[in-house]
Image (spheres, grey):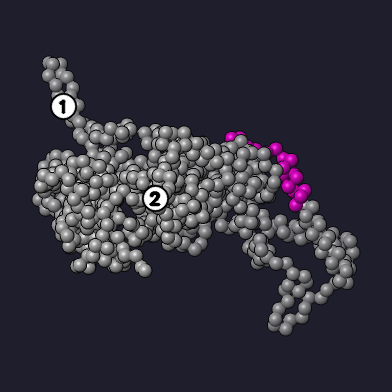
Amino acid sequence: MAPFSLLTQRNVTIACFALHNFIRKEGLSDDFFDEYDHPNVRLQDGDEHAQDGGEEEVAYHGSAADREFMSQLRDQIAQELMQNNEREMENNKITLFRSLNAQSTNYTVKAKIISMWNKKMNGSDSQIYRVDMLLMDEEGSFIQCSCLHKLFKRFLKFFVVDDCLLFHKPSLAKDTTKIKVTGNDQKLSLYAFSSVLKTENWSGPRYFFRFTDFKSVLSKKVEVNTPIDFIGYVVVSYPIEDANRKDGSKTKRMNITLKDLEDQKISLTLWENYAISLSEYMNDKNRPDHVVILVHFGTANIYQGKIGLTNMFEASRVFINSDLDQIQEFKDGYIEKEFSNSSSIKQSCSQVISSAEDEFLNAEDFVLTAYIASISVEKKVIIVGTVITISNDKPWYYLSCNNCKKQIEEKSTLVEKDDGSFDVLDEKTFECINSDCDAVDVVPVYRYKIPLRVQDSTGTVSCTLFDYEAIKLIKKTSKELLDVYSKVDNSTEGSFQSLPSEFDILINKKFAFQIKISSFNISNQIENYGISMLSCDDDILSALENKWKINDSDMSDSNVQCLSDSVGNVKCCSKGSQSVIGDSVTPDNFDVNDQDQSKFENIKRNLQDVYDVDAVQSSSTKRRNSPGNDNLNDDVNLDLITPKLEK
């Protein structure tokens, strides 16, 4: 515009501003606005609208030096306008969230984006209807904010998590979501007259957490689906798995056991991207030994009668070993407490339960069923066998405590009447038989304990299939089956005239089992073992058969070894000697006798309260027949099969 007079240049500029503001205020659709509103649009000189169809190029006015001068001048003016606008917004009185009201929209708020998520169009997963954000002001108060899709191109470039923004003239709207993340039924909404600018001037906290302790959750002092913050040490993480949403679509789920500084343990379930991120982190062989998770805006939930923690599908923020002061302070306190205990040498790292394939193929304790009875130490072992029958003289379900999964007993409450006699209240109450359980209100939960008879080429043994693995095979809960099949008696653990037909999928099926030899089995000589894990995967069965030469009819002495109290299946995530479970690297050879035994105490740690196996005592009272030889265990030395070493 250099060749035109200053008056003409001024009038053209004013006209452009007027036209621009008219289009913006009226919300008109304009192709050029749509193009240049894009945050990554590339502005070209002069010929950006030249066409390939042979049209004449737009004529330039003035010399190249004039055009360069005007280009720099435009940039300078634009920069100064933006800076002036930002100063004006900051100079305006900042309104805090607690002072917002619907009487006016002429206010400016300064806020930090804590989390952000998208709402999809109804019936379309590819189109976004609205962007929602969780904002925090400099006082640490929170409010939800929304931006509709028609305004995306104006504001999306500003929406970056953890950035601080100035919102001028936002409108207040009613929050119609079912769960009010901030506890406020009002939210901010951006509209045509709103404006947004990024600012570096932030004097508020980095984050503001209001932590809830695990005991309050377990004692049900926290209402379900109420947003809470919590922090805990990862005791163990389980394999990530597929799950179904309520609408039938697929998602990912990962279960974790957390412990706080008060030694309270609780289950945490992470979903979707949160689960994927944690799974990748936990299975990284270079990760730290100790893992602490902080969940911002998580919630408590109840699944199958048991209370636990979970993330919200949208608003939650999950921090895994981040550089937050709260995480470092918690980790230091946890480790210090572990070392201050008398058993400090057993202080452990965060454990990883691998996939079924890794758990079976990396196991070093395989045993034939005939030799299980000779085991005299608590441990988990692998067996391979076929389910030949399900005992119909034992119940296949039990009433469990919603807190610890142990069996519960029904209690009757007696009330003294006016005549001195007593009456039994109709209301049922339950008491957990586990003396260590601290459940306040015991809620009965039906769980599986299916009594299987498993057979291999050396014998038959009784094994109990519990809830966690049973549901994966049967695809129904025990309560769902109980609602279908009528019960014969009214006892706590009634029996049925016939077993549910859903159990037929187990009969004559070959499985690899990981079973637990407990102190109860050993001290009471009870041959009924709890199943920790099982798999009918053909590749796993084939690999086990090849590894342990299961089908070899003539077993040479060089292939067998006595069971000992050697290192079991628990693999500690230590950088020095062993990698994360599931890693294909073989640990360095070492002689246990030459090592400090305290270094291996943690590896021998029992995973009874780590893996999700229902902890109930066997209902069987039948003791195994003994020929009366007190030295039976000493006489038997063909217990554990180990693979041949390749020379």
Q: Residue at point 40% right, 44% down?
A: 597
Predominant secondary structure, magenta span: helix
Residue 223 percent location from the top left of the image: 40, 37
Observer-nearest of 640 and 596 = 596
Evaluate whether residue 172 shows in this view.
no
Residue 632 percent location from the top left of the image: 17, 48
Observer-nearest of 143 and 380 = 380
Observer-nearest of 614 and 642 = 642
Q: Residue at point 36% right, 59% down?
A: 362
Characterize the local packing of mark 2: few (<14), some (14-19) or many (20 or more) Cα atoms within 10 angstroms. Answer: few
Q: Amino acid at mark 2?
A: Val
Characterize the local packing of mark 1: few (<14), some (14-19) or many (20 or more) Cα atoms within 10 angstroms. Answer: few
Residue 405 vertical placement versus 421 (above, below) = below
Residue underneath mark 2: 592
Quarter the C terminus occupies? bottom left
Residue 565 percent location from the top left of the image: 31, 48
Which region of the structure is painted magenta?
82-102
Q: Amino acid at mark 1?
A: Val
Q: Are marks 2 and 1 in contact (CB under 8 Å)?
A: no
Instruction: Let me know if residue 86 is in the magenta part.
Output: yes
Say which quarter of the image contains residue 300: top left
Residue 253 percent location from the top left of the image: 40, 54
Mark 2 vs mark 1: which is more N-terminal?
1
Using the numbered discs, state the Cα–Cα distance from disc 2 to disc 1 in whole angstroms: 61 Å
Q: Residue at point 69% right, 47% down?
A: 199
Residue underneath mark 1: 424
| Residue located farthest toward the front when viewing the structure as drawn | 594
Quarter the N terminus occupies? bottom right
Observer-nearest of 608 and 341 = 341
Check disc 1 and report its element: helix, strand or loop: strand
The answer to whether residue 289 is left or right of residue 12 is left
Residue 416 vertical placement versus 426 (above, below) = above
